[in-house]
Amino acid sequence: MFGEQFYPTPKEVISKLIEPIVVENTESRKNSSKKSIPERIFLEPSAGKGDILDYIKEKYAQHCKLNAYCIEIDPNLIHILHGKGYQVIGNDFLTTRPTNYFDTILMNPPFAYGAEHVLHAWDILESGEIHAILNKETIDNPYSAKRKALIAIIEAHGSIEHIGRAFIDAEVKADVSCSIVRLYKKVTKKRLYWEPKEFKQAKVVDFGDTNLINDKVALNDQVETMIIQAEQLRTAMVSLIRSNQAVSFYSKGLMKLGPEKLMTILQEKSAELQYNAFNDSLKTSIWMEMLNKSKVSEYMTSNVQKNWQQFVASTGSMEISKENVYKVIEMIFMNRHEIMKQAVVDVFDLFTKYSEENKMVVESWKTNSCWKINKKIIVPWVVRYGEYMNQHSIKQYGDKFSINYHKSQDFWDIDKVMCYLSGKSDSVTIEEALKDRFHIIGTVRPGDKFDNELESTFFKIKFWKKGTIHITFKDDKLWDLLNMIACDMKNWLPPEEKKKWKEREKTETPQSNLNQLLLSQ
């Protein structure tokens, strides 16, 4: 189902794999240089459905955040990982160069390409540990240059543990002997850490009168040290201010990185976690900006936009690379009409939620559970007039009409879909038409006559003081298109109707309209 190289890692093998990184209890933690599970930043390449991270989370990180990233090539498995809340930062591990920091790579790479995967892991790891499950034959038969290179790294920086036929009773069985390769990479200077210059701390003295007289040498030394330290602090502060200015400059158009956001990032426990928090936020912001510029989003209803934002949230961990960007843009392009069809369904449901009178039962469909929308739609609680005034005040001063701002999003959604159906990139919206008429009418007192009939680009509109408006489709073809697309998406059309619609759909659906709208902007 998930490809011939998909071999989920059994729990007993995971236990053996992570054995060296587990700090069992508080006492051993005090006497150990090991990082605890919550302190580590994990990367699981070829993550599958996340079995290794699931095991760690269940046993050692139930009550704390697990700092973990995944890479997975199978789209179905990526969907599973997203569902579990894991951050997927790439799909093809061998071509991914992560910008995040991590100190522990846990691997069950494809048996056929184990050497390549471990070598790439060693290359991208700045400092930390790699624990990888390999086919034992990869170690025993170093016939290729890559296998020989791996053996050399193991001899210099790690160890091998043979674990036998570990997958013989696994979820996906494999009758191969396996080994665990453990590598440890240390660097003397990490990119994120600042090393202070040599600074001699003077003996701390009491500034009381006695010491001023009796220990002037120590006092002089202390004062001189404080002056030097203060100057170094000023220099560091200048660097901080300049860096802050640079951050502010380069963040424009990419992400909102104000003081509050920076403080949240800097509250992370380590420099690596601080950087990852920043980097994750940056990537999500860039993805959001790029996806919003796809232009399709401009015609999305608010409901579709929520799904869009969820997609961006799951995509936001992906590395910003040309390959990844092209893949996402291609996915949007291939699905753009389905996205807009869902927007049509949202507006169809919006119309029918206001009143049962907005539903038109089709006799030939022989069921009350399916319907079309009427040409005239009743929408309540739209117009505001005299809401916060008593009768005396209304009679004496009158009031002006206004729109219930809670309805604004509904009107925007309706007009977006109508633009899509018609191919129009510009229109007088329902809200604009109402506001223009309200402005012309001005203040209205009881008994005053006013013109309550008007038109937007797509609708004839009539409104009343009680708050209700009626909107009527001006174009029967657009009304029919909206009904047929929505009913087809809901699978409401009877077989004969569906057959007729599929023939009509080839020439009458607004697919070319969307292309025209996107090209016109």
Image (tube, rainbow, N blue to C red):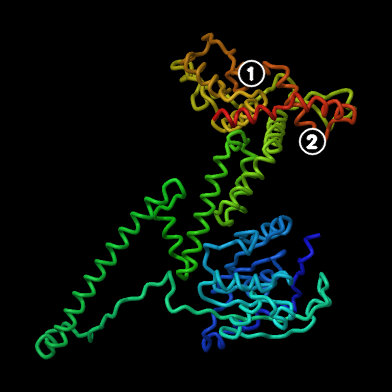
Please rate how many residues cluster around mark 2, counting C-alpha atoms within 10 Å: few if below 14, some from 14 to 19, many from 20.
few
Mark 1: amino acid: Phe
Q: What percent of the width, then of the height, locates residue 109?
A: 69, 70
Vertical comparison of 206 with 112: above or below: below
Q: Which residue is mark 1?
A: 459
Q: Which residue appears at 76% of the width and 74% of the height?
A: 10
Q: Nearer the viewer, residue 319 or 440?
A: 319
Q: What percent of the width, then of the height, locates residue 88?
A: 62, 60
- Residue 113 is left or right of residue 426, and the answer is right
- Residue 322 is left or right of residue 17, and the answer is left
Quarter placement of the N terminus:
bottom right
Q: Which residue is mark 2?
A: 490
Give the tally of numbered discs.
2
Q: Nearer the viewer, residue 220 or 194?
A: 194
Location of residue 384 (image quadrant): top right
Vertical comparison of 481 with 109: above or below: above
Q: Which residue appears at 53% of the width and 10% of the height?
A: 450
Q: Which residue appears at 23% of the width and 74% of the height?
A: 229
Q: What percent of the width, then of the height, locates residue 60?
A: 64, 75
